[in-house]
Image (cartoon, rainbow, N blue to C red):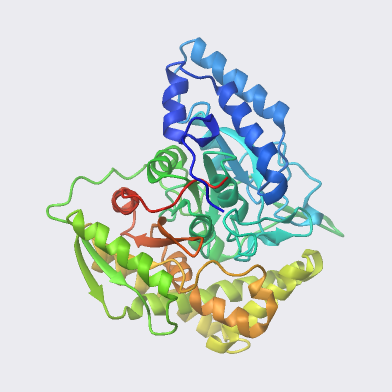
Amino acid sequence: MAHTTAPDELWQRTATDLAARIRVREISAVEVMRSCLGRIEETNGALNALVDVRPDEALAAARAADRAVAAGADLGPLHGVPVSIKINTDQLGHATSNGVRALAHRPAEGDAACVTALRASGALPLGRSNSPAFSFRWFSTNDLHGRTLNPWDHGRTPGGSSGGAASGLAAGMTPLAQGNDIGGSIRFPAACCGVVGLRPTVGLVSDWAPPAYAETPDGLVELDFPPTVHACAVQGPLARTVADVRLALDAMSTPDLRHVHGLPVLPRRPSAAGGPMKVSVVREIGTVKNHPAVDRAVREAATRLAAAGYEVEELDDMPLLAEASRLWSLLITEDIRLIRPVVAQLGDASIRTALDNHFAAAADLWGERPELATYINGWARRATLITRLQEMLGSDRLLLTPVCAEPPFEQDADIATPGRARELFTAMWPMTAVPVLGFPAVTVPVNVSEGLPFSAQIIGGRFEEHRVLDAAEVVEARPTGLTLWS
Protein backbone atom coordinates (compact mmCIF):
# COMPACT_ATOMS: atom_id res chain seq x y z
CA MET A 1 0.00 0.00 0.00
CA ALA A 2 1.05 3.65 -0.33
CA HIS A 3 1.94 5.73 2.70
CA THR A 4 2.48 9.48 2.92
CA THR A 5 5.78 10.35 4.57
CA ALA A 6 7.70 13.58 4.94
CA PRO A 7 11.22 13.34 3.46
CA ASP A 8 13.01 13.41 6.81
CA GLU A 9 14.90 10.15 6.32
CA LEU A 10 17.82 10.22 3.90
CA TRP A 11 16.52 7.18 2.00
CA GLN A 12 13.40 9.19 1.16
CA ARG A 13 15.27 12.05 -0.51
CA THR A 14 15.90 12.43 -4.21
CA ALA A 15 19.24 11.73 -5.84
CA THR A 16 19.50 15.40 -6.83
CA ASP A 17 19.04 16.51 -3.22
CA LEU A 18 21.44 13.93 -1.81
CA ALA A 19 24.21 14.79 -4.29
CA ALA A 20 23.87 18.51 -3.57
CA ARG A 21 23.98 18.01 0.20
CA ILE A 22 26.93 15.60 0.06
CA ARG A 23 28.85 18.08 -2.09
CA VAL A 24 28.64 20.85 0.56
CA ARG A 25 29.25 18.37 3.41
CA GLU A 26 25.81 18.91 4.92
CA ILE A 27 25.52 15.12 5.01
CA SER A 28 28.01 12.35 4.31
CA ALA A 29 27.93 9.56 1.76
CA VAL A 30 28.28 7.11 4.63
CA GLU A 31 25.15 8.50 6.30
CA VAL A 32 23.24 8.12 3.03
CA MET A 33 24.53 4.59 2.50
CA ARG A 34 23.64 3.54 6.06
CA SER A 35 20.14 4.96 5.59
CA CYS A 36 19.62 3.01 2.36
CA LEU A 37 21.06 -0.16 3.89
CA GLY A 38 18.66 0.26 6.80
CA ARG A 39 15.76 0.64 4.40
CA ILE A 40 16.88 -2.49 2.52
CA GLU A 41 16.98 -4.37 5.80
CA GLU A 42 13.46 -3.15 6.57
CA THR A 43 11.76 -3.86 3.24
CA ASN A 44 13.74 -6.20 1.02
CA GLY A 45 12.81 -9.32 2.92
CA ALA A 46 9.22 -8.77 1.86
CA LEU A 47 9.82 -7.53 -1.68
CA ASN A 48 13.00 -9.35 -2.83
CA ALA A 49 13.89 -6.45 -5.12
CA LEU A 50 17.66 -6.50 -4.56
CA VAL A 51 20.00 -9.48 -4.42
CA ASP A 52 23.71 -9.73 -3.63
CA VAL A 53 23.74 -6.70 -1.34
CA ARG A 54 27.22 -6.31 0.19
CA PRO A 55 27.10 -3.75 3.02
CA ASP A 56 30.85 -3.79 3.73
CA GLU A 57 31.68 -3.13 0.07
CA ALA A 58 29.08 -0.36 -0.18
CA LEU A 59 30.21 1.36 3.01
CA ALA A 60 33.85 1.20 1.94
CA ALA A 61 32.91 2.97 -1.29
CA ALA A 62 30.95 5.57 0.68
CA ARG A 63 33.91 6.24 2.98
CA ALA A 64 36.11 6.74 -0.10
CA ALA A 65 33.54 9.17 -1.50
CA ASP A 66 33.62 11.18 1.74
CA ARG A 67 37.41 11.31 1.65
CA ALA A 68 37.19 12.75 -1.87
CA VAL A 69 34.82 15.47 -0.64
CA ALA A 70 37.12 16.31 2.26
CA ALA A 71 40.13 16.51 -0.05
CA GLY A 72 38.39 19.01 -2.33
CA ALA A 73 38.43 16.61 -5.29
CA ASP A 74 36.51 17.32 -8.48
CA LEU A 75 33.16 15.65 -7.79
CA GLY A 76 30.80 14.10 -10.30
CA PRO A 77 27.10 15.00 -10.44
CA LEU A 78 26.03 11.85 -8.56
CA HIS A 79 28.84 11.81 -6.02
CA GLY A 80 27.91 9.57 -3.09
CA VAL A 81 24.46 8.58 -4.42
CA PRO A 82 23.58 4.84 -4.20
CA VAL A 83 22.37 3.10 -7.35
CA SER A 84 21.24 -0.47 -8.00
CA ILE A 85 22.67 -2.46 -10.92
CA LYS A 86 20.61 -5.11 -12.74
CA ILE A 87 21.67 -8.76 -12.55
CA ASN A 88 22.07 -8.94 -16.35
CA THR A 89 24.63 -6.10 -16.39
CA ASP A 90 28.35 -6.63 -15.75
CA GLN A 91 29.59 -5.23 -12.45
CA LEU A 92 33.14 -6.05 -11.40
CA GLY A 93 33.25 -8.88 -8.89
CA HIS A 94 29.53 -9.72 -9.12
CA ALA A 95 28.06 -12.56 -11.17
CA THR A 96 26.08 -11.50 -14.23
CA SER A 97 23.60 -14.25 -13.47
CA ASN A 98 20.65 -12.99 -15.48
CA GLY A 99 18.58 -15.04 -13.05
CA VAL A 100 20.06 -18.31 -14.34
CA ARG A 101 21.69 -20.82 -11.99
CA ALA A 102 24.27 -21.90 -14.56
CA LEU A 103 25.55 -18.32 -14.86
CA ALA A 104 25.72 -17.55 -11.15
CA HIS A 105 29.21 -18.83 -10.34
CA ARG A 106 31.52 -16.61 -12.42
CA PRO A 107 32.05 -13.00 -11.20
CA ALA A 108 32.33 -10.34 -13.91
CA GLU A 109 35.90 -9.36 -14.68
CA GLY A 110 34.96 -5.77 -15.44
CA ASP A 111 32.16 -3.24 -15.55
CA ALA A 112 29.75 -2.65 -18.41
CA ALA A 113 30.18 0.80 -19.92
CA CYS A 114 27.03 2.13 -18.25
CA VAL A 115 28.33 1.04 -14.83
CA THR A 116 31.69 2.65 -15.56
CA ALA A 117 29.87 5.88 -16.44
CA LEU A 118 27.83 5.80 -13.24
CA ARG A 119 30.96 5.24 -11.15
CA ALA A 120 32.70 8.11 -12.97
CA SER A 121 29.79 10.36 -12.01
CA GLY A 122 30.33 9.43 -8.36
CA ALA A 123 27.38 7.04 -8.01
CA LEU A 124 27.92 4.10 -5.65
CA PRO A 125 26.55 0.67 -6.70
CA LEU A 126 24.39 -0.84 -3.95
CA GLY A 127 22.80 -4.19 -4.62
CA ARG A 128 21.91 -6.08 -7.77
CA SER A 129 18.30 -5.73 -8.91
CA ASN A 130 16.32 -8.86 -9.72
CA SER A 131 14.89 -9.82 -13.11
CA PRO A 132 13.29 -12.85 -14.78
CA ALA A 133 15.56 -15.58 -16.08
CA PHE A 134 17.29 -14.35 -19.24
CA SER A 135 15.58 -10.97 -18.64
CA PHE A 136 12.79 -11.83 -21.02
CA ARG A 137 9.44 -11.51 -19.27
CA TRP A 138 7.22 -8.66 -18.10
CA PHE A 139 7.54 -10.23 -14.64
CA SER A 140 10.54 -10.64 -12.33
CA THR A 141 10.91 -14.12 -10.95
CA ASN A 142 13.53 -16.82 -11.39
CA ASP A 143 14.62 -20.03 -9.68
CA LEU A 144 17.96 -18.54 -8.64
CA HIS A 145 16.80 -15.48 -6.71
CA GLY A 146 13.04 -15.97 -6.36
CA ARG A 147 10.12 -13.63 -7.01
CA THR A 148 10.15 -9.84 -6.77
CA LEU A 149 6.92 -8.26 -5.54
CA ASN A 150 5.25 -4.98 -6.41
CA PRO A 151 5.19 -2.70 -3.32
CA TRP A 152 1.71 -1.44 -4.25
CA ASP A 153 0.10 -4.86 -4.60
CA HIS A 154 1.93 -8.15 -4.10
CA GLY A 155 -0.51 -9.89 -6.41
CA ARG A 156 0.53 -7.67 -9.34
CA THR A 157 3.74 -7.77 -11.32
CA PRO A 158 6.41 -5.20 -10.49
CA GLY A 159 7.10 -5.33 -14.21
CA GLY A 160 9.96 -6.91 -16.07
CA SER A 161 12.56 -7.29 -16.80
CA SER A 162 13.86 -4.46 -14.56
CA GLY A 163 11.27 -5.29 -11.91
CA GLY A 164 13.73 -5.42 -9.05
CA ALA A 165 15.05 -1.97 -9.97
CA ALA A 166 11.57 -0.41 -9.96
CA SER A 167 10.36 -2.22 -6.83
CA GLY A 168 13.48 -1.18 -4.94
CA LEU A 169 13.05 2.44 -5.97
CA ALA A 170 9.40 2.53 -4.96
CA ALA A 171 10.31 1.12 -1.55
CA GLY A 172 13.15 3.60 -1.02
CA MET A 173 16.01 1.10 -1.12
CA THR A 174 18.00 3.26 -3.54
CA PRO A 175 17.29 6.68 -5.09
CA LEU A 176 18.50 5.57 -8.52
CA ALA A 177 18.52 2.36 -10.56
CA GLN A 178 20.11 1.17 -13.77
CA GLY A 179 18.03 -0.94 -16.13
CA ASN A 180 17.81 -1.99 -19.75
CA ASP A 181 14.99 -2.14 -22.25
CA ILE A 182 14.32 -4.16 -25.40
CA GLY A 183 10.55 -4.57 -25.04
CA GLY A 184 9.51 -2.24 -22.23
CA SER A 185 11.91 -3.55 -19.57
CA ILE A 186 12.64 -0.08 -18.13
CA ARG A 187 9.39 1.71 -18.89
CA PHE A 188 6.90 -0.98 -17.87
CA PRO A 189 8.39 -1.76 -14.41
CA ALA A 190 8.61 1.97 -13.71
CA ALA A 191 4.91 2.33 -14.48
CA CYS A 192 3.92 -0.76 -12.48
CA CYS A 193 5.71 0.60 -9.39
CA GLY A 194 4.86 4.30 -9.76
CA VAL A 195 8.35 5.59 -10.59
CA VAL A 196 9.94 7.17 -13.68
CA GLY A 197 11.76 5.15 -16.35
CA LEU A 198 13.55 6.42 -19.46
CA ARG A 199 14.48 4.43 -22.53
CA PRO A 200 17.11 6.58 -24.32
CA THR A 201 17.80 6.76 -28.05
CA VAL A 202 19.85 3.76 -29.19
CA GLY A 203 23.54 4.66 -28.92
CA LEU A 204 23.26 7.55 -26.46
CA VAL A 205 24.14 5.34 -23.49
CA SER A 206 26.80 2.81 -24.41
CA ASP A 207 25.67 -0.81 -24.34
CA TRP A 208 29.24 -2.11 -24.43
CA ALA A 209 30.14 -4.85 -21.97
CA PRO A 210 33.13 -7.18 -21.55
CA PRO A 211 32.98 -10.23 -23.84
CA ALA A 212 30.57 -12.94 -22.74
CA TYR A 213 31.50 -16.62 -22.88
CA ALA A 214 29.71 -19.95 -22.69
CA GLU A 215 31.14 -23.27 -21.60
CA THR A 216 31.12 -25.94 -24.32
CA PRO A 217 32.74 -29.38 -24.63
CA ASP A 218 35.50 -27.62 -26.59
CA GLY A 219 36.06 -24.98 -23.91
CA LEU A 220 34.90 -21.38 -23.53
CA VAL A 221 33.32 -19.84 -26.63
CA GLU A 222 32.72 -16.11 -27.02
CA LEU A 223 29.04 -15.32 -27.47
CA ASP A 224 27.71 -13.18 -30.30
CA PHE A 225 24.42 -11.40 -29.73
CA PRO A 226 21.66 -11.25 -32.39
CA PRO A 227 20.79 -8.09 -34.38
CA THR A 228 17.87 -7.00 -32.21
CA VAL A 229 20.11 -6.78 -29.13
CA HIS A 230 22.40 -4.35 -30.93
CA ALA A 231 19.66 -2.38 -32.70
CA CYS A 232 16.89 -2.34 -30.10
CA ALA A 233 18.31 -2.85 -26.58
CA VAL A 234 19.38 0.15 -24.50
CA GLN A 235 20.69 0.89 -21.01
CA GLY A 236 18.91 3.62 -19.08
CA PRO A 237 17.94 5.10 -15.71
CA LEU A 238 14.98 4.71 -13.38
CA ALA A 239 14.28 7.05 -10.45
CA ARG A 240 11.46 8.48 -8.37
CA THR A 241 11.50 11.88 -10.12
CA VAL A 242 12.02 13.13 -13.64
CA ALA A 243 14.78 15.45 -12.42
CA ASP A 244 16.71 12.47 -11.06
CA VAL A 245 16.26 10.55 -14.29
CA ARG A 246 17.63 13.55 -16.21
CA LEU A 247 20.64 13.74 -13.89
CA ALA A 248 21.32 10.01 -14.26
CA LEU A 249 20.90 10.14 -18.04
CA ASP A 250 23.51 12.89 -18.31
CA ALA A 251 25.87 10.78 -16.21
CA MET A 252 25.28 7.58 -18.19
CA SER A 253 25.56 9.17 -21.65
CA THR A 254 29.09 8.66 -22.98
CA PRO A 255 30.71 8.53 -26.42
CA ASP A 256 31.81 4.95 -27.04
CA LEU A 257 32.67 3.50 -30.43
CA ARG A 258 33.08 0.02 -28.96
CA HIS A 259 29.29 -0.17 -28.97
CA VAL A 260 28.12 -1.01 -32.50
CA HIS A 261 25.69 1.95 -32.42
CA GLY A 262 27.83 4.10 -30.13
CA LEU A 263 28.45 7.78 -30.79
CA PRO A 264 31.83 9.50 -31.30
CA VAL A 265 30.52 12.62 -29.55
CA LEU A 266 27.35 13.35 -27.62
CA PRO A 267 24.63 15.38 -29.38
CA ARG A 268 24.06 18.93 -28.21
CA ARG A 269 21.22 19.52 -25.84
CA PRO A 270 18.48 21.01 -28.07
CA SER A 271 17.79 24.71 -27.92
CA ALA A 272 14.28 25.98 -27.33
CA ALA A 273 11.88 25.19 -30.16
CA GLY A 274 10.72 28.07 -32.33
CA GLY A 275 7.13 27.76 -31.16
CA PRO A 276 5.08 25.73 -28.71
CA MET A 277 5.76 22.00 -28.66
CA LYS A 278 3.08 19.83 -30.18
CA VAL A 279 1.76 16.64 -28.60
CA SER A 280 -0.14 14.02 -30.57
CA VAL A 281 -2.19 11.73 -28.33
CA VAL A 282 -2.46 8.10 -29.46
CA ARG A 283 -4.80 6.22 -27.15
CA GLU A 284 -5.29 3.03 -29.16
CA ILE A 285 -4.13 1.35 -32.37
CA GLY A 286 -7.33 -0.56 -33.09
CA THR A 287 -6.27 -3.93 -31.69
CA VAL A 288 -7.29 -3.70 -28.03
CA LYS A 289 -9.44 -1.48 -25.83
CA ASN A 290 -7.93 0.32 -22.86
CA HIS A 291 -8.93 -0.27 -19.26
CA PRO A 292 -10.83 2.84 -18.06
CA ALA A 293 -8.06 3.77 -15.60
CA VAL A 294 -5.55 3.69 -18.46
CA ASP A 295 -7.65 6.14 -20.44
CA ARG A 296 -8.01 8.40 -17.42
CA ALA A 297 -4.24 8.56 -16.96
CA VAL A 298 -3.62 9.49 -20.59
CA ARG A 299 -6.42 12.06 -20.55
CA GLU A 300 -5.06 13.67 -17.36
CA ALA A 301 -1.52 13.79 -18.79
CA ALA A 302 -2.84 15.48 -21.94
CA THR A 303 -4.76 18.01 -19.82
CA ARG A 304 -1.64 18.93 -17.86
CA LEU A 305 0.42 19.37 -21.03
CA ALA A 306 -2.25 21.56 -22.62
CA ALA A 307 -2.44 23.71 -19.48
CA ALA A 308 1.33 24.21 -19.70
CA GLY A 309 1.10 25.56 -23.26
CA TYR A 310 1.67 22.44 -25.36
CA GLU A 311 -0.46 22.16 -28.50
CA VAL A 312 -2.31 18.90 -27.88
CA GLU A 313 -4.16 17.03 -30.61
CA GLU A 314 -5.94 13.67 -30.56
CA LEU A 315 -5.13 11.10 -33.24
CA ASP A 316 -7.82 8.53 -33.97
CA ASP A 317 -5.20 5.96 -34.93
CA MET A 318 -1.53 5.66 -35.80
CA PRO A 319 -0.87 2.72 -38.12
CA LEU A 320 2.89 3.30 -37.91
CA LEU A 321 2.97 2.35 -34.23
CA ALA A 322 0.76 -0.66 -34.86
CA GLU A 323 3.10 -1.84 -37.59
CA ALA A 324 6.17 -1.25 -35.42
CA SER A 325 4.70 -3.36 -32.62
CA ARG A 326 3.93 -6.11 -35.08
CA LEU A 327 7.50 -5.94 -36.44
CA TRP A 328 8.88 -6.28 -32.93
CA SER A 329 7.12 -9.63 -32.62
CA LEU A 330 8.79 -10.80 -35.83
CA LEU A 331 12.35 -9.58 -35.34
CA ILE A 332 12.70 -10.33 -31.63
CA THR A 333 11.07 -13.74 -31.94
CA GLU A 334 13.20 -14.91 -34.84
CA ASP A 335 16.37 -13.78 -33.08
CA ILE A 336 15.31 -15.60 -29.90
CA ARG A 337 14.65 -18.73 -31.94
CA LEU A 338 18.43 -19.13 -32.31
CA ILE A 339 18.98 -19.26 -28.54
CA ARG A 340 15.78 -21.08 -27.64
CA PRO A 341 17.63 -24.39 -27.12
CA VAL A 342 19.94 -22.68 -24.60
CA VAL A 343 16.95 -21.25 -22.74
CA ALA A 344 15.33 -24.67 -22.74
CA GLN A 345 18.49 -26.22 -21.32
CA LEU A 346 19.43 -23.60 -18.71
CA GLY A 347 16.23 -21.70 -18.00
CA ASP A 348 13.69 -22.39 -15.30
CA ALA A 349 10.18 -23.69 -15.91
CA SER A 350 8.60 -20.22 -15.92
CA ILE A 351 10.83 -18.81 -18.65
CA ARG A 352 10.38 -21.93 -20.77
CA THR A 353 6.58 -21.66 -20.54
CA ALA A 354 6.65 -17.90 -21.09
CA LEU A 355 8.78 -18.36 -24.19
CA ASP A 356 6.48 -21.07 -25.55
CA ASN A 357 3.53 -18.71 -25.12
CA HIS A 358 5.49 -15.85 -26.69
CA PHE A 359 6.19 -17.95 -29.79
CA ALA A 360 2.53 -18.97 -30.00
CA ALA A 361 1.42 -15.33 -29.88
CA ALA A 362 3.98 -14.34 -32.53
CA ALA A 363 2.83 -17.22 -34.74
CA ASP A 364 -0.66 -15.71 -34.78
CA LEU A 365 0.86 -12.73 -36.60
CA TRP A 366 3.67 -14.26 -38.66
CA GLY A 367 3.06 -18.00 -38.86
CA GLU A 368 4.92 -20.81 -37.16
CA ARG A 369 8.18 -20.40 -39.09
CA PRO A 370 8.48 -17.15 -41.06
CA GLU A 371 10.67 -17.38 -44.15
CA LEU A 372 14.07 -15.73 -44.29
CA ALA A 373 12.72 -13.23 -46.83
CA THR A 374 10.03 -12.18 -44.36
CA TYR A 375 12.67 -11.56 -41.70
CA ILE A 376 14.91 -9.58 -44.07
CA ASN A 377 11.97 -7.53 -45.32
CA GLY A 378 11.06 -6.84 -41.72
CA TRP A 379 14.42 -5.16 -41.13
CA ALA A 380 13.99 -3.18 -44.34
CA ARG A 381 10.53 -2.04 -43.31
CA ARG A 382 11.87 -1.01 -39.89
CA ALA A 383 14.22 1.48 -41.56
CA THR A 384 11.31 3.00 -43.48
CA LEU A 385 9.23 3.37 -40.32
CA ILE A 386 12.11 5.05 -38.48
CA THR A 387 12.43 7.62 -41.24
CA ARG A 388 8.70 8.30 -41.35
CA LEU A 389 8.38 8.71 -37.59
CA GLN A 390 11.38 11.02 -37.41
CA GLU A 391 9.91 13.15 -40.19
CA MET A 392 6.63 13.35 -38.32
CA LEU A 393 8.15 14.23 -34.94
CA GLY A 394 11.00 16.49 -36.03
CA SER A 395 12.19 18.57 -33.09
CA ASP A 396 8.84 20.06 -32.07
CA ARG A 397 6.40 17.16 -31.70
CA LEU A 398 5.95 14.45 -29.08
CA LEU A 399 3.65 11.45 -28.86
CA LEU A 400 1.60 10.71 -25.75
CA THR A 401 0.43 7.10 -25.35
CA PRO A 402 -0.66 4.66 -22.68
CA VAL A 403 1.98 2.43 -21.11
CA CYS A 404 -0.17 -0.65 -21.56
CA ALA A 405 -3.84 -1.22 -22.29
CA GLU A 406 -4.21 -2.95 -18.89
CA PRO A 407 -3.29 -2.18 -15.29
CA PRO A 408 -0.17 -3.97 -13.95
CA PHE A 409 -0.75 -7.63 -14.76
CA GLU A 410 -1.57 -10.25 -12.17
CA GLN A 411 1.53 -12.23 -11.22
CA ASP A 412 2.51 -14.90 -13.80
CA ALA A 413 -0.29 -13.90 -16.19
CA ASP A 414 1.99 -14.72 -19.12
CA ILE A 415 2.26 -18.37 -18.08
CA ALA A 416 -1.32 -18.85 -16.84
CA THR A 417 -2.72 -19.90 -20.23
CA PRO A 418 -1.67 -19.30 -23.84
CA GLY A 419 -4.82 -17.24 -24.30
CA ARG A 420 -3.98 -14.92 -21.44
CA ALA A 421 -0.43 -14.59 -22.76
CA ARG A 422 -1.85 -13.47 -26.11
CA GLU A 423 -3.87 -10.77 -24.33
CA LEU A 424 -0.70 -9.43 -22.71
CA PHE A 425 1.11 -9.50 -26.03
CA THR A 426 -1.60 -7.30 -27.54
CA ALA A 427 -1.97 -4.98 -24.55
CA MET A 428 1.75 -4.14 -24.53
CA TRP A 429 1.83 -2.46 -27.94
CA PRO A 430 3.06 0.89 -26.50
CA MET A 431 6.05 -0.91 -24.99
CA THR A 432 6.98 -3.01 -28.03
CA ALA A 433 6.50 -0.40 -30.76
CA VAL A 434 9.23 1.88 -29.44
CA PRO A 435 12.29 -0.44 -29.18
CA VAL A 436 12.09 -1.65 -32.75
CA LEU A 437 12.32 2.01 -33.87
CA GLY A 438 15.01 3.11 -31.40
CA PHE A 439 13.36 6.36 -30.27
CA PRO A 440 13.50 7.77 -26.73
CA ALA A 441 10.50 7.31 -24.46
CA VAL A 442 9.72 7.88 -20.80
CA THR A 443 6.97 6.57 -18.57
CA VAL A 444 5.88 8.98 -15.87
CA PRO A 445 3.34 8.49 -13.06
CA VAL A 446 0.05 10.35 -13.46
CA ASN A 447 -2.36 9.13 -10.77
CA VAL A 448 -3.52 6.28 -8.57
CA SER A 449 -6.67 4.26 -9.21
CA GLU A 450 -7.96 1.40 -7.09
CA GLY A 451 -4.70 1.31 -5.16
CA LEU A 452 -2.45 1.02 -8.23
CA PRO A 453 -0.26 3.63 -9.95
CA PHE A 454 -1.03 4.57 -13.56
CA SER A 455 1.40 6.28 -15.89
CA ALA A 456 1.62 7.69 -19.40
CA GLN A 457 4.32 7.31 -22.02
CA ILE A 458 5.93 10.23 -23.87
CA ILE A 459 7.89 9.54 -27.08
CA GLY A 460 10.15 12.03 -28.86
CA GLY A 461 12.39 12.29 -31.89
CA ARG A 462 15.78 10.65 -31.78
CA PHE A 463 18.19 12.33 -29.33
CA GLU A 464 15.38 14.58 -28.07
CA GLU A 465 15.53 13.12 -24.55
CA HIS A 466 15.53 16.49 -22.83
CA ARG A 467 12.34 17.60 -24.59
CA VAL A 468 10.74 14.29 -23.63
CA LEU A 469 11.81 14.85 -20.03
CA ASP A 470 10.60 18.48 -20.09
CA ALA A 471 7.13 17.20 -20.94
CA ALA A 472 7.37 14.47 -18.33
CA GLU A 473 8.13 17.08 -15.66
CA VAL A 474 4.92 18.89 -16.62
CA VAL A 475 2.96 15.66 -16.25
CA GLU A 476 4.41 14.93 -12.81
CA ALA A 477 4.32 18.58 -11.67
CA ARG A 478 0.86 18.48 -10.09
CA PRO A 479 -0.12 16.40 -7.05
CA THR A 480 -1.04 12.95 -8.35
CA GLY A 481 -1.93 11.02 -5.22
CA LEU A 482 1.27 9.04 -5.57
CA THR A 483 3.29 8.67 -2.39
CA LEU A 484 6.40 6.75 -1.49
CA TRP A 485 5.48 3.22 -0.51
CA SER A 486 6.05 2.20 3.09
Of residue 436 and residue 479, the one placed in the foreground of this image is 479
Q: Is residue 237 left or right of residue 266?
A: right
In the rendered view, tell whether residue 288 sits above or below residue 103: below
Of residue 374 and residue 276, the one placed in the foreground of this image is 276
Residue 48 visible, this angle: no
Q: Is residue 14 left or right of residue 472?
A: right
Q: Is residue 18 left or right of residue 221?
A: left
**At 63% from the left edge and 88% from the top edge, which residue is drawn?**
368
**At 65% from the left edge and 67% from the top edge, which residue is drawn?**
411
Of residue 84 and residue 93, the one placed in the foreground of this image is 84
Q: Position of residue 394 (x, y in %)?
A: 23, 61
In the rendered view, tell whether residue 139 sits above or below residue 290: above
Question: Which quadrant of the figure contains the C terminus?
Answer: top right
Residue 9 visible, this angle: yes
**At 62% from the left edge and 51% from the top edge, which residue is drawn?**
164
Q: Is residue 302 left or right of residue 252?
A: left
Q: Position of residue 344 (x, y in %)?
A: 77, 71
The total of numbered circles placed on residues is: 0
Q: Residue furthest right?
A: 217
In the rendered view, tell whether residue 345 sits above or below residue 22: below
**At 57% from the left edge and 86% from the top edge, which residue is drawn?**
371
Q: Quadrant of residue 385?
A: bottom left
Q: Position of residue 43 (x, y in %)?
A: 66, 43
Q: Residue furthest top?
A: 71
Question: Which quadrant of the figure contains the N terminus?
Answer: bottom right
Of residue 56 and residue 213, the one placed in the foreground of this image is 56
Q: Position of residue 199 (x, y in %)?
A: 45, 55
In the rendered view, tell whether residue 444 sits above or below residue 45: below
